[in-house]
Image (cartoon, rainbow, N blue to C red):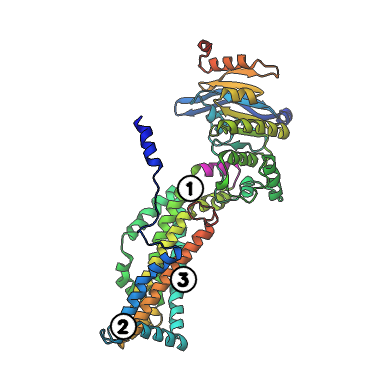
Amino acid sequence: MTVQPRAEAFQKNAVVVSNLRRAYGERSVIDHLNLVIGQGEFVVLLGESGCGKTTLLRALAGLDPVQGGTIEVPGRPAVVFQEHRLLPWETLWRNVTLGLRAGDARARAAAALGEVGLGDRLDDWPRNLSGGQAQRVALARALVQEPKLLLLDEPFAALDALTRLRMHGLVKDLVARHQPGVLLVTHDVDEAIRLGDRILVMRDGVIAAEHRLTPDQDVAAARAELLSELGVSVGNEK
Amino acid sequence: MSVTTEFAATEGRTYSSAPLPGIRLGQNGLVALSWLVPVLLLIVWEGLARFGWIEPHLLPAPSKVALTAYKLTVSGTLLHDLAVSLLRAAVGFAIGGGIGFALGTLVGFSRIAEAFIDRSVQMVRAIPFLAVLPLVIVWLGVGEGQKIFLVALGVAFPIYVNTTLGIRQVDPKLVELGRVQGLSNWELIARIVLPGALPSILTGVRFSLATAWLALVVAETIGAQAGLGFLALDAREFLRTDVIVLTVIIYAMIGVAADSLARLLERRLLKWHPNYGAGR
């Protein structure tokens, strides 16, 4: 009886986190946190350094053990890290299909690399890529697995400003096409407003504030509010 | 102000690449120059031997050594002894390298294996492997076993040390990525850990090739019935210095060939690596 609704919920939800607790010794980094991300929903997690946002992402990725609560993810989540983490000894298509269990791996890699604009570089080596290109390959490697949940851990932080803006557009398009639930961890408020359907502000291991963005959003007001929640005063600039 | 004037002063300066005024050599010229001294020495040696300045039974003329090489090759003795020596080196290398690689992999992956194995290996490694030669002769006699054992002993340690080191130096972030991508333990080892450790392992191979050769020279000098060392030893009985010089030269040539082989392996297997890859 209880199994049925849960299975149904999986079709709509990319991840259900309830009562999650993660601690180093006595100190709780994540304290009884609840979070649901829907299929196709783009959630941005904002917060200062050390607030626990990367810890949450790593827990969702299954990289760190948790001390309490449950995380329910359909299938295996895909992760894009701040560094591209491409294997330097394998060609791009082999990198993209790392861990992929499919007979037509090369064809899938070609399609995925095509989606990020590198369809003609299948047999090239990672060392010949720029930072932005490498991060695009990392994105292709995540999406080729057709994940229900895509975890992005500050993937644009190391890129220059122009490349970052192009990456924002690319990620937005790809998420719209593949419809995974997305959790993007960042400390860039403008990035959060540009990409997020929903913005969460994390503080001291809990979600301190939540904003749903609408298409006719007053961007300046949202920005000021988010910054004040992050403890940055912008009032005296005018 | 002073900064800008300094800039102006350096702007007009030109640098010349010629090492000496008036002499310019291309790449080929430099290669030719590097061979000048060895060739001159060879000519002087030949001349001194020809005109009787050096006793032939102390050091024969280079032409005599070349003639001996030709005669021994035609009679088949040289090739037979060379084959015997190479086989010993290869078998010893395979055994020692295999053991070194297996133990190195084990210790590289497991802290428990490290605690259990590493101290003992390091203790044995502290012994200069040629020092155990008398003991090895007592254990194994002076047959093939003793020679192969000595080569294997010399080879095992460089490979062990570099394999362990290479595995430890693999970027943990890439291992983490492998886990995220759902690789099994075997896939993780085959696609991330061993390729990442390969540059270090190949350095170990290069070191151990040199050691293997040294071990063989020493081992073959004692009670061999065939092989290059036997050839030299046998020649000593009859004061055939031309044969002795020939074996020394062959030892040197094989050492060079082994090193080139190792470097070829590096270029092939590490073509992705910016420091080794040929196809940049």
Image quadrant for the N terminus of chain A?
top right
Of circles 2 and 1, the one toward us is 2
Q: Report the chain holding disc 3.
A: B
Three-letter amino acid code at disc 3? Answer: Ala
Looking at the image, residue B263 sits to the left or right of residue A164; the answer is left
Magenta residues, start to end: B173-183
**Image x and y of residue A131, in percent:** 56, 39
Q: Report the chain holding disc 1.
A: B
Residue B103 higher or lower than A134, as above or below:
below
Looking at the image, residue B228 sits to the left or right of residue A10; the answer is left
Q: What distance separates the C-alpha of mark 3 from that of mark 2?
A: 39 Å
Q: For mark 2, does the 10 Å Cα neighbourhood hold few (<14), some (14 to 19), or many (20 or more) residues?
A: some
**At numbered mark 2, what does the secondary structure look like: helix, strand or loop?**
helix
> What residue does disc 1 label?
B170
Labels 2, 1: one chain? yes
Q: For mark 3, does the 10 Å Cα neighbourhood hold few (<14), some (14 to 19), or many (20 or more) residues?
A: some
Residue at 64%, 26% in the rendered image: A195
Front-most of residues B18 and B58: B18
